Image (tube, rainbow, N blue to C red):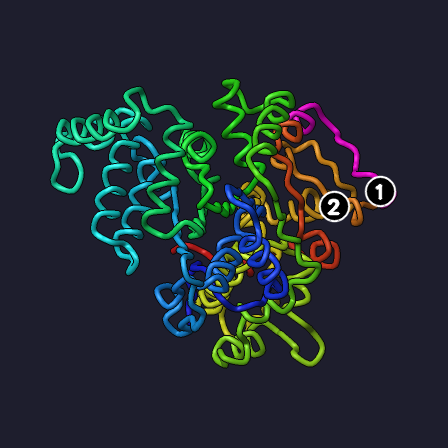
Amino acid sequence: MAVVNDEPTLEDHLHHDSMVPIIASRIRDCNPPYVMGIGGTWGSGKTSFLRKTWAVLGGNDSLYFPNKPNSIKPKTGEHIIWFNPWHHQFEASPAVALLHEIHKHLSMTDRAINEAKKLGTVTILTALNYLGDLGKMLGAEGIQGIKTDEIQKRGENWEAERFQTSLTSEKFRTVFEKTLAQIIGKNGRLYIFIDDLDRCERDIPFKLLEALKLYLSARNCVYILGLDRHHLERSIAKELTGSSDTGPQLAHAREYLGKMFQSYYLLPRPESMEGYISSVLNLAGDPGFNTLLVTRFGYKPNQENIAQTLDQNLPHNPRKIKAFVHSWQLYLQTLEKQVPANVPLDWKTTVVLHYLGQFEEPLLRRLEEFPGAFWTDIKSFADIGVSEDNRFDGLEISPELSLVSDSLTPPPLSRPAEQKALAAHQKRLFYIVPLVRTTTLDPTAIRRHLPRAG
């Protein structure tokens, strides 16, 4: 059985290909300085979308997709840079790491003449002095073999020759723009893709956004940021106000982000994930697993559609779906080894139980102790959407599946604890409801479908 990792892909099972050229055209046609946001929840395919856009603009995707080398080349004067601040979040300043990435890229460009390279190096070293405490950033060894005090001296001399005063953010932008113009040409462009900013901890996201706004907002630069806006708002709210848990703080952070982006594109949620799920399952290319499903777990390929069932019972999040399918396959292999060949097994039951293990572990642990709780607790909650058991706190049924209210009204909240959880953005949907409602199992059957240790 092939095991696939979670790296970005150029495949279009999420139907993004029609949108990528439109985004790429906007990037090329915009008037820098320009910041574009590409939004989506964690695992929604943002990185793959950014990589495709990067490739359309001429980024060298053969580095990341060796089986699909990119034939598109950047236009003259265009430079495409990929930066992941998550990989640098334990450094003192993400802006320092970004400047190093820009400097490294421009140092390798064919158009960089020696004097421009020298000017660019000094400019960036000077900029580092104004983006944070250089001693803490670089340590005693300095950068590229130059000691910290020497960098300070070179930077101060260069600055004194040109401005005679402290390098303010406005002057820094001017220096930065002129330096880039020397290296990439007056009409040159830097397209800088920044991914996973929302994954960074502490004050890293806020520091980098501030640097983009105050120091790096140059006429030569277009920034394309992939982000989960909800997570980023909470991080920024904490930096701006000291708290991220109430409406006013989040509203403040939302206003801040609104001023950062000249355009923001939220990746649409696919209405159907059947095609994507089928590609992950790969039943046609994995005859061993296909045979296992049919011979041991009662799958009837002519009457049942696994991809359709999973589409109806899983969150429409590519990363979560991929992780679920791969771990479910392992679950079935483990179970098949433990249960005698003459004992019947049901694939839909394993989907329900594995879902609980992946997304609602306390409920699965409850079943391991008391299999009858499937009827008294889980199926009951799936039917009416409320429970007094704290294992269900923050859990709710999608409005269109509710049996206790009309299709436009969410099910009622039964206790203050649930209301508090939902207010703190901890609510989550119980996606497995359709399958739970149609499952008819006695405690013996449930116990039979639970893998055992020992």
The N terminus, quarter of image = bottom left
Label 1's element?
loop
Tell me if residue 441 can be seen: no
Name which residue type carries label 2. Ser
Q: Position of residue 434 (x, y in %)?
A: 73, 56
- Give residue 69's quadrant in the image: bottom left
The tag on residue 232 is none
Residue at (30%, 30%) from the top-left corner? 92
Q: Is residue 410 magenta?
A: yes
Q: Is residue 180 magenta?
A: no
Tell me if residue 2 can be seen: yes
Question: Image check: 452 left or right of 304?
Answer: left
The tag on residue 408 is 1
The tag on residue 398 is 2
Residue at (26%, 47%) from the top-left corner? 116
The C terminus, quarter of image = bottom left
Q: Which residues are magenta?
A: 405-420
- Give residue 93's quadrant in the image: top left
